[in-house]
Image (spheres, rainbow, N blue to C red):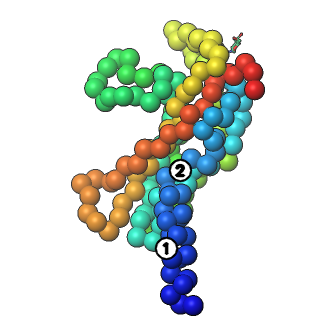
Amino acid sequence: MRFSALPLLALAGLTAAQNKATISLPKSGTSIAPGEVFDFQYNTMADYGVTSYNYTVWLFTSGLPSSFAPSLNWADGHFFGRFSEPNYPGNNDPTNLPPATLTMPNFDKSPGGFGAGLAEANQNCAFVVMEEYATGVGSFGLRISLTSNTIIYNATSS
Ligand SMILES: *[C@@H]1O[C@H](CO)[C@@H](O)[C@H](O)[C@H]1NC(C)=O
Ligand SMILES: *[C@@H]1O[C@H](CO)[C@@H](O)[C@H](O)[C@H]1NC(C)=O
């Protein structure tokens, strides 16, 4: 009895570990219209032995950047915000809780000033979360995970 339960426990642990640093919502392949309010849910790295700090949420309309070489046109996209989930010990009571929903900008509209928007349809975009976390194994600065789901901006058919 005791021994036969072990593989199941190991499997449960594996499933939990695979759930870390994942974007549950929006799911990959979700179509999101300009201006649409969409559900957002991210599973942090927080676990026994792992403390999660802040994570930042981005949309790269130009796709996942392939390099970090400095460039004036490094990427196109939008920054949604910097959020944090309570996790004990270390980050029990963050003030910047994640919202349950985010709003897709309408990129056809001018963002103001000289900025001009651009109409686009059926564009695959990278919805990205970068999380700061740390474990009991020393790291030179916080560890940073990178997670990305693909979403479709302004799909013209469903
Ligand atoms: C998390 O982000 C908030 C808002 O930017 C900031 O006030 C806070 O110090 C950050 N916490 C950590 C642990 O980096
Ligand atoms: C969405 O796509 C349609 C069809 O191509 C286009 O007419 C419209 O301007 C697009 N909207 C935005 C906000 O880019």
* Residue 49 place in picture, x, y as percent: 40, 70
Tag 2's secondary structure? Answer: strand
Question: Which residue, given by chain and number where applicable, does mark 1 sit on?
Answer: 10
> CB of mark 1 within 8 Å of CB of mark 2?
no
Q: Which label number is shown at residue 22?
A: 2
The answer to whether residue 22 of the structure is visible from this angle is yes
Residue located at (54% from left, 84% from top): 4
Residue located at (49% from left, 73% from top): 10
89 up-or-down from 96: above or below: below
Tag 1's secondary structure? Answer: helix
Residue located at (55% from left, 38% from top): 149
Horizontal side of 157 relative to 142 (left or right) equals right
Name the residue at the bottom extreme: 1
Please state which amino acid type lies under the numbered disc 2. Answer: Thr
Horizontal side of 100 relative to 56 (left or right) equals right
Residue located at (63% from left, 42% from top): 27
Q: Quadrant of the C terminus?
A: top right
7 up-or-down from 122: above or below: below
Q: Which quadrant of the structure image shows residue 116? A: top right
The answer to whether residue 106 of the structure is visible from this angle is no
Q: Which label number is shown at residue 119?
A: none
Foreground: disc 1 or disc 2? 1
- Whereabouts is ligand 2, in terms of quadrant? top right
Closer to us: 57 or 158: 158
Name the residue at the right extreme: 158
Q: Are there few (<14), some (14-19), or many (20+) residues within 10 Å of tag 2?
A: some
Horizontal side of 89 relative to 27 (left or right) equals left
Q: CA distance from mark 1 to mark 2?
A: 20 Å
Q: Quadrant of the N terminus?
A: bottom right
Q: Which badge, 1 or 2, is on the more N-terminal residue? A: 1
Closer to us: 95 or 155: 155
Please state which amino acid type lies under the numbered disc 1. Answer: Ala
